[in-house]
Image (cartoon, rainbow, N blue to C red):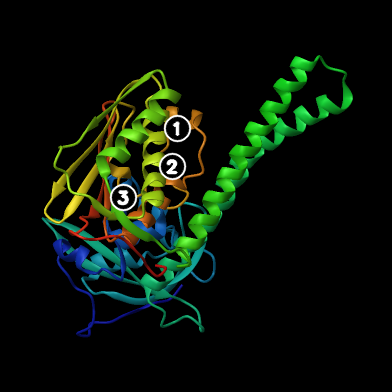
Amino acid sequence: MSYVTETGRNSPQVNYQDLYLYGSDAVLVIDEKRRVLALNPAAEAITGWQESEVAGKKECSKVFGCHGRDGVRLCRTACPGIEAMRTSVPVEHVECRITTRQGVHLDVEASFSPVPVAAASAAAIFVRGVAGSNRRNESFAQWAAEQELEKLKAQFLARVSHELRTPLTTMMAGSQLLARKELPAGKVQEIATMIEQQAKGMSKLVESLLELSRMVAGECAIKRTSVGVPALLRDMAGQFEAASPLHRLVVDCPVNLPRAAADRSRIRDVLEILLDNAIRYSPDGGTVTLAAERRRDLVCISVADEGVGIPRQNFGSVFSPFYRVEGAVSKKVKGAGVGLALCKYVVEMHGGRIWLDSEVGEGSVFYFTLPVARPGFAGMPEASH
C-alpha cells in the first residue's frame, strides 16, 4: 500500500477540541498505540459504534478495520496514522476499505492528521467521501443517509418477520387441529377465538405499517377541530383502566385548560399508543398519569408510568421507525417498533413536538404539544404533510 504526504494549506491540522466541528466528515482520533480516543457523531453513524463504547477501550482495527486495496490490514504494514504522528505531517487521500460493526465493507477515502492531545501523540482519521470512480465527489452525509436507509430496510424486514411468525404459527396449528380432529364444541370455540385474536393482531400490525408508509410518503391529511383535552383524557383513561386491572389511571388537568386545535381521531391514536406502551412496560402495575397543561400558545399533554424506564442513551432513537430498546421486559413484549414513530409523525403534522424523560427502574414520561384553538375556531381540513 502506497500513500503520499502533503503539507498544503488544505491539510486538516486541527486541535483535538475542534474534532466535532467537522460535521460532514467521519472523524476518529487514535493514540500512538492505535487506541481510539474519540469518535464524532458522523463516525458513530457510519461505524455503528458509540463513542462511550470504544473511547479508551478499543483499538482502531476493531472500529474501522482499515484495509488497503490489496486486502491487507493497514495496521499490519504501515499505518498512515502512526506515520502522521511520527513525522507530524498529514497523510492524504488514502483509499481503503473499512468494516462497520454490522460487518458491512465500505470503500472510502481517508486522510490522517496529527493532532495535539496534552503531552501525548495522536492522529485524527478523516473519512471525507466514498472512494470509487462514480462516487468520488459524493458527500459523506449523503452516503451516511443512504446507509441509514439500508439499515432501516433491514430492521423492517427483521421486525415484521419476527412479529408475523408467531401469530402465523399459532393460527396454522389451530386450523390444523380444527381440520383433523373431532373436538368438543367448547374447544372449537376456544381455538376459533384464538385464531380471530391473532388475525386481529396481524391486521393491526399491517395497518400500522401502511399508515407509517403513507405518512412518510406525505399522503396523510389531518382535519383539525376544537378538541376538549380533559374530556378526551378521561375517556382514554376509562378505556384502559377497564382493560388493565393492575394499573390505576389518573387524569390531572386544570379546569380552565384551553381547547386544542387538533384532529381528534389521530390524537386518540397517539394517546392509545402511549397508554398501551405505559401499561405493557410496567408489568407489575402501578399508576399511569395522563396530564395536560397550557404552555403559552400550546397545550402540553403527558403520559407517565412507573415501569422499567428507558436508558438515557436511547432517547434519541426511540422515535425512529422499527427501533426497540433492548431489555428483559422488551423481549417479552411484542412490537415492531412502529408506534412511537407514528406518534412523532402525527404530532409534527399538527405543528407540535414529542419528547420523553425517563429513569431506568423508575418509569417514563412522554410529552407532546398541540396548538391552542383560538376563540371561534370550528375546524378545517388540512392538506397532506
Residue 217 pos. (x, y %): 48, 67
Name the residue rendered at 61%, 38% in the picture: 200
Report the front residue among 192 and 224.
224
**Can the viewer see residue 73?**
no
**Can the viewer see residue 132?**
yes
The image's mark for residue 324 is: 2
The image's mark for residue 330 is: 1
Residue 359 pos. (x, y %): 25, 32
Residue ID for mark 3: 316
The amino acid beneath tag 3 is: Gly
The amino acid beneath tag 2 is: Arg
Are there few (<14), some (14-19), or many (20+) residues within 10 Å of tag 2? some
Q: Secondary structure at mark 3?
A: loop
Residue 197 pos. (x, y %): 63, 32
Horizontal side of 354 relative to 218 (left or right) equals left
Name the residue rendered at 39%, 53% in the picture: 63
Q: Is residue 261 above or below residue 136?
A: above
The image's mark for residue 299 is: none
Name the residue rendered at 40%, 51% in the picture: 266
Name the residue rendered at 33%, 27% in the picture: 307
Report the front residue among 154 and 247.
247
Residue 102 pos. (x, y %): 49, 52
Q: Is residue 233 above or below residue 361?
A: below
Are there few (<14), some (14-19), or many (20+) residues within 10 Å of tag 3? few
The answer to whether mark 2 and mark 1 are in CB contact below 8 A is yes
Q: Quadrant of residue 183?
A: top right
